[in-house]
């Protein structure tokens, strides 16, 4: 073929491709260029009528309003329910659930009781008898192999209560001023010290019991040349305390608490292991002596009295001992009254005996009626310590509250202001009240 023929064939092919290709549309007319009369619009479709509201149907009483909450959600709401922090609908749903689910009901009661402990309108201090109740419950289930003697229980309880008080006070409060009060002759006296000084006083006087049991004397470190064990320095409670205070290189601090508490634990442990015969062991107080069982009761009484002095100094509430222990303390003071009355008579501070009585025979008697916790009736022989108090020979009667009587014996209440009720021989009443106050000492 020639070149012309080939050229015509290529041109015909391009024309065929152009004719078969898609055409590009031209520009559209603007909306303003359209003639609306040329178009027929469809009729508008009417809107459907709104449905009429159906009348509300009353729900059954047993059907809870609102959506039902699953168990896990209701259980999670128990804490908020106990704190009354739920909405009204949540509260209704939770309370309806509690009537059907026993585990959640028990949990709700525990949470509500726990919330009650958060109220600030009650004291957060522990009940002073809590320790005794816990020990009593424990011992009832598993009795101690070596129990604490009954006559040492008051000392055990009072030292534990005082130690709990000392744990709660701050470092600065150990230097808080405390004024110790007691009675001498016809008047009250006092001595100023600190909280730490009071614990040092208790430590030193408790040392009299320690030396009687052959234990270490805490005063031995203060007195040069004194043996650590055995009789120790032959000093009465007051000079022992003064020696301890004056020998201290600097004022005592809270460091005195540990040796005092260790000594009290040692005393309780020693008398518990010693057996029954140790109860009558003589404990010397310098110018008089007491059986060990009475000496332990005397130490319990002084521990309680001085714990009250400390509590007052640091503005801390403190309760009296239990009724059983308070009764024992009152009984000890009542048994010591005839001898104290005879001692005051020998020094001319009390009236003479009215009638000579042979030992063991009844004589003139004062009826001491102690009311309230730990109270009872005691009959005090007036003319001789060896005489017997007898209801048939009563010439006077005095009525006091139990705690007030103990405050009188501690020298914290003037004798003339102590008795709530008096009847009979006024001289006998006065002599007995002053004799009760004379039992106090530093």
Image: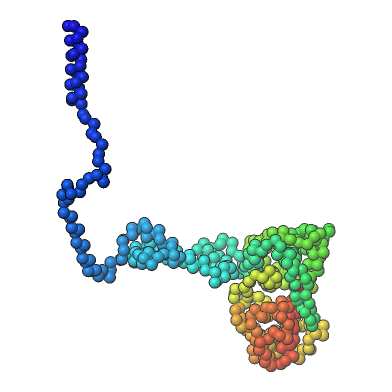
Look at 63% across and 67% down and name the residue there. 161
- Left-right relation of 252 to 156: right
Q: Is residue 303 visible?
A: no
Q: Is residue 200 left or right of residue 74?
A: right
Looking at the image, what colour scheme do you see?
A: rainbow
Q: Position of residue 241 (x, y in %)?
A: 78, 67
- Residue 288: horizontal and vertical position, in percent? 77, 73
Residue drawn at the location 30% of the way across and 66% of the way down: 64
Residue 402 pos. (x, y %): 64, 80
Task: Give the left or right position of residue 163, taking residue 194 as reference.
Answer: left
Instruction: Looking at the picture, tell me which residue is in the foreground, 416 or 178.
Output: 178
Quick one: which residue is furthest to the right in this view?
Answer: 224
Query: Residue reaching furthest top?
Result: 1
Residue furthest out toward the bottom: 424
Total labels drawn = 0
Q: Is residue 377 left or right of residue 346?
A: left
Judging depth in this view, the residue of 113 and 374 nearest the camera is 113
Q: Quadrant of the C terminus?
A: bottom right
Residue 419 in sight here: yes
Quadrant location of residue 344? Answer: bottom right
Return the residue nearer the eye: 390 or 186.
186
Quadrant in the rendering for residue 305? bottom right
| Residue under the image location 76 percent in, 59 percent down | 229
Quadrant location of residue 318? bottom right
At 18% across and 25% down in the image, what residue appears? 20
Q: From the image, which quarter does the N terminus lie in?
A: top left
Residue 222 location (% of width, % of height): 80, 60
């Amino acid at each position: 073929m020639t070149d012309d023929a080939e050229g015509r064939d290529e041109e015909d092919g391009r024309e065929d491709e152009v004719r078969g290709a898609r055409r590009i549309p031209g520009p559209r007319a603007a909306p303003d260029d359209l003639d609306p009369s040329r178009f027929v619009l469809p009729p508008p479709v009417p809107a459907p009528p709104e449905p009429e509201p159906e009348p509300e149907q009353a729900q059954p009483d047993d059907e809870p309003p609102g959506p039902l909450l699953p168990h896990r959600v209701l259980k999670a709401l128990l804490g908020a329910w106990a704190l009354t922090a739920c909405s009204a609908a949540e509260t209704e749903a939770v309370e309806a659930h509690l009537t059907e689910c026993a585990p959640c009901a028990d949990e709700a009661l525990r949470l509500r009781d726990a919330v009650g402990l958060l109220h600030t309108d009650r004291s957060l201090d522990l009940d002073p008898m809590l320790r005794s109740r816990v020990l009593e419950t424990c011992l009832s289930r598993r009795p101690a192999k070596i129990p604490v003697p009954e006559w040492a229980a008051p000392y055990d309880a009072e030292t534990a209560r005082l130690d709990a008080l000392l744990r709660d006070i701050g470092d600065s409060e150990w230097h808080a001023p405390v004024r110790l009060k007691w009675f001498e002759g016809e008047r009250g006296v006092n001595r100023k010290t600190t909280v730490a000084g009071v614990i040092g006083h208790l430590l030193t006087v408790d040392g009299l019991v320690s030396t009687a049991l052959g234990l270490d004397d805490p005063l031995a470190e203060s007195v040069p040349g004194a043996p650590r064990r055995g009789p120790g320095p032959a000093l009465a409670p007051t000079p022992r305390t003064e020696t301890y205070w004056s020998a201290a290189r600097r004022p005592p601090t809270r460091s005195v608490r540990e040796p005092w508490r260790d000594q009290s634990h040692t005393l309780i442990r020693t008398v518990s292991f010693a057996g029954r015969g140790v109860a009558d062991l003589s404990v010397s107080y310098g110018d008089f002596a007491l059986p060990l069982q009475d000496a332990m009761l005397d130490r319990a009484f002084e521990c309680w009295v001085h714990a009250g002095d400390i509590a007052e100094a640091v503005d801390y509430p403190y309760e009296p001992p239990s009724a059983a222990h308070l009764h024992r303390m009152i009984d000890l003071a009542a048994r010591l009254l005839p001898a104290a009355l005879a001692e005051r008579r020998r020094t001319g501070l009390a009236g003479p005996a009215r009638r000579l009585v042979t030992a063991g025979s009844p004589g003139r008697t004062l009826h001491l009626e102690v009311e309230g916790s730990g109270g009872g009736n005691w009959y005090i022989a007036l003319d001789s310590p060896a005489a017997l108090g007898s209801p048939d020979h009563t010439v006077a009667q005095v009525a006091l509250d139990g705690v007030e009587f103990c405050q009188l014996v501690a020298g914290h209440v003037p004798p003339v202001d102590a008795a709530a009720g008096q009847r009979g021989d006024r001289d006998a009443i006065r002599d007995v009240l002053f004799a009760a106050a004379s039992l106090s000492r530093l």
